[in-house]
Image (cartoon, grey):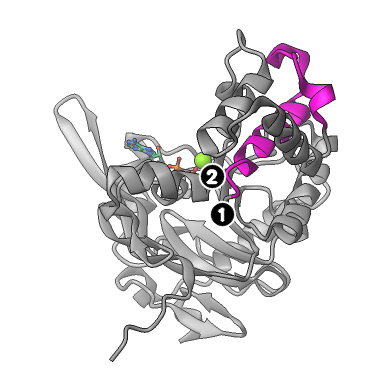
Amino acid sequence: MSKPRETALLRADALAKVFTIRQGFSSQSFRAVDDASFTVEAGKPEIFTIAGESGSGKTTLARMILGMELPSEGTLSYKGRDVAKLTSRDRREWFFRDVQPVFQDPFATFSPLKRVDHYLYETAFNYKVTDKAGADGYINQVLNEVGLSLAEVKGRYPNELSGGQAQRISIARSLITKPSMIVADEPVSMVDASLRMSIVNMFRKLKDDQQVTILYITHDLATAYYAADRIAVMLRGWIVEMGPVENVLGSPMHPYTQNLKASIPQADPDKVWDSKISLADLDTEEFAQVGCKFASRCPAVMDKCKHKVPPNFERDGRMVKCFLYE
Ligand SMILES: Nc1ncnc2c1ncn2[C@@H]1O[C@H](COP(=O)(O)OP(=O)(O)OP(=O)(O)O)[C@@H](O)[C@H]1O
Ligand SMILES: [Mg+2]
């Protein structure tokens, strides 16, 4: 019998990342990403948001998806292949081209001493463009995709660009290798508030025009609600609610998602969650909790929540990890 064809673009199966923090003679391990499972389908471009408060594991998950960090447990497969088992050649010549990152700080990816077009040409020549004239045309084309042109960008140094322009150029660069997936970690949080929507809109356009799936990582529920097709809400490494954005943010079921939605006024996109985890927090806090990691903050907590990990339930067109829906 022939093997069933893999239909997923990306599949995470019980993914975990364990970090150990050392302080003096003591050390403590915790699960920055814990039992995360989800599927991104192939041939169905979407904007899939990963949201959650600071320290919930979004960047750690993104780094595993980008192949920058190995999972401690579980598997990640991309187009049917285990990312951890790729040969270095396949990583370089296939995976790192097909899955492109966009980072929070566009200026961190450009040296202040180099003209920004240098990066575009470098990526184009590394890809498959061979001559200068071909490169000019191709680079102009990818810049057009993000609302810029080569004439506007050529010869400019990073300090001559606004944050919004620099982020557009780094997105243009990510398009050069014609990726199937872009992983954008907080791509608009350093961009002027007035320009955020235009970048988020651009992601929607790229999804349609370039047939690229975008993993949009953010703590900003307002842009997520506006731009995303699907959302996964993270809490201390877990995915606690996941589904179409109109279901999950329109009528959140997990008390944590309800809490997040209530605490973020839609009118204030600058308001962010804060709660950096330090070692001091860790030993008492939610990472170490035996049952549900939200139990100590949950307004609907039940006795069993303190002892047992809630399973994932399928309810009302989404997954929700909460005993209330047993
Ligand atoms: N290399 C590392 N070693 C130890 N702990 C780490 C490491 N990287 C991240 N962490 C910790 O793992 C947890 C999750 O961090 P992560 O950066 O993934 O969260 P995040 O959701 O992206 O947060 P933010 O919204 O602030 O970007 C945090 O407690 C963080 O301090
Ligand atoms: Mg982060």
Q: Secondary structure at mark 1?
A: strand
Q: Would you say the beta carbon of the disc 1 residue lies within 8 angstroms of ligand 2?
A: no
Position of the C terminus, as image quadrant, is bottom left
Q: Which residue is mark 1?
A: 181
User: Farthest residue toward the bottom?
Assistant: 1
- State the image coordinates of residue 182 (x, y, percent, origin top left): 58, 49
Residue in front for this viewpoint, 228 or 20 = 228
Precedes in sequence: disc 2 or disc 1: 2
Residue 221: quadrant of the picture: bottom right
CA gap between label 2 and label 1 equals 6 Å
Q: Residue at x 41, y 44 (%)?
A: 93
| Numbered-mark total | 2
Mark 2 and mark 1 residues within 8 Å of each other at the beta carbon: yes
Residue in front for this viewpoint, 315 or 203 = 203
Residue in front for this viewpoint, 314 or 99 = 99
- State the image coordinates of residue 233 (x, y, percent, origin top left): 55, 61
Q: Residue at x 77, y 13 (%)?
A: 160
- State the image coordinates of residue 238 (x, y, percent, origin top left): 42, 61
Which of the numbered marks, if any, corresponds to residue 100? 2
Q: Is residue 58 above or below residue 276?
A: below
Looking at the rendering, the stretch of residues picked out in magenta corresponds to: 149-178
Residue in front for this viewpoint, 131 or 137 = 131
Q: Give the quarter the ligand 1 occupies.
A: top left
Residue 247: quadrant of the picture: bottom right
192 sits to left or right of 277: right
Q: Is residue 39 above or below residue 281?
A: below
Q: Amino acid at mark 2?
A: Gln
Q: Main secondary structure of the magenta part?
A: helix
